[in-house]
Image (cartoon, helix red, strand yellow):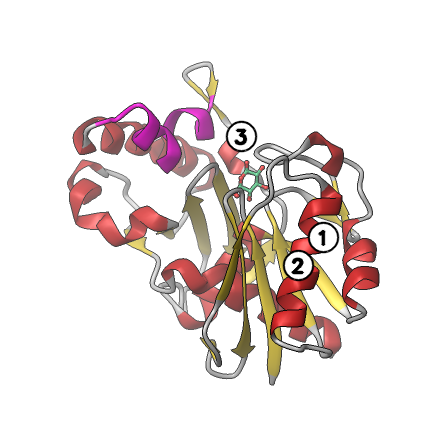
Amino acid sequence: MEILGIDIGGSGIKGAPVDTDKGELSADRHRIPTPQPSTPEAVVNVVAQIVEHFEWNGLIGCTFPAIIKNGVTHSAANVDNAWIGFEAEKMLRQQTGCSLLLINDADAAGIAEMKFGAGREAEGVTIVLTLGTGIGSAIFVDGELLPNTELGHLEIKGKEAEKWTADSIRKKKDLAWNEWGERLNTYLSHLEFLFSPDLIILGGGVSKKFNKYESYLTTHAPCVPAKLRNEAGIVGAAMAAQRMAH
Ligand code: BGC
């Protein structure tokens, strides 16, 4: 089935039609920088532009970097505060004129990784993390998602984990790989203590550079890089929308 996947991030809003049987984009991705400030109105407008670009009038799956319950966004860690308590799914449906499902970005990336990427056939408890501007998380038990886990906001050494070990912090503070790798390891070890995962999948831009920090990770559970890279959010959003259609 072909569904338009859209991934709303802190710096870019990306979309592409997805072949949900193959887990692949069926056309080149279209990206528009996230408007600043990232108010609901401005962001919803950009989503409508992406829908127009593909002349789309079918089903859409869309991610957002926040807690999402029944189509309402309930947090705003790296976006404009006006998103808190906003009827985002309803507004996006109105502006695009399409059937649309809104899902947390890390949950979407996790869904795609579990089906087509590093989590294929994983049993037991899998934790998928997206390390980018913030840290997103998705927990799966035998392939079933526990939504909205927000493990990036867990406190580590008196600080929110994402303010200490997100990839954006590595770049901003110019941390060497060993320094950042050790921070990440402290965080992962804490997650392991709390959840006893069988597998940990690390996504986001740094998944490409896994060999630079792999040696600092000491968890008992295997830690592997995500396979779908930049496209996981788009693919997972489309997959989640497809489930809604059934
Ligand atoms: C947000 C999460 C999101 C993650 C990755 C966090 O700051 O609270 O909802 O999944 O960033 O974008």
Give x and y (percent) for residue 85.
80, 38
85, above or below 210, in the image:
above
The residue carrying pointer 2 sits among few (fewer than 14), some (14 to 19) or many (20 or more) residues within 10 Å by Cα, namely: many
**Pointer 3 residue Cβ closer than 8 Å to ligand 1:** yes
Determine whether the residue tagged by mark 3 lies in a helix, strand or loop. Answer: helix
Residue positioned 66% across, 78% down in the render: 55
Q: Can residue 142 be seen in this view?
A: no
Instruction: Report the magenta residues as a range.
Output: 160-175
| Residue highlighted by disc 3 | 153
Specify the quarter for ligand 1: top right
- Check residue 44 in the rendering and tell me which mark sits there, or answer none: 1
Q: How crowded is mark 1: few (under 14 residues within 10 Å), some or many (20 or more)?
A: many
Q: Which amino acid does label 2 sit on?
A: Val
Nearest to the eye among marks 3 and 2: give it: 2
Assess whether residue 58 is covered by the magenta stretch: no
Q: Distance between the residues labelled 1 and 2?
A: 5 Å
Q: Verify CB contact (< 8 Å) between mark 3 and mark 2.
A: no
Label 1 with label 2: CB-CB less than 8 Å: yes
Query: What is the quadrant of the C terminus in the image?
Result: bottom right
Q: Which amino acid does label 1 sit on?
A: Val
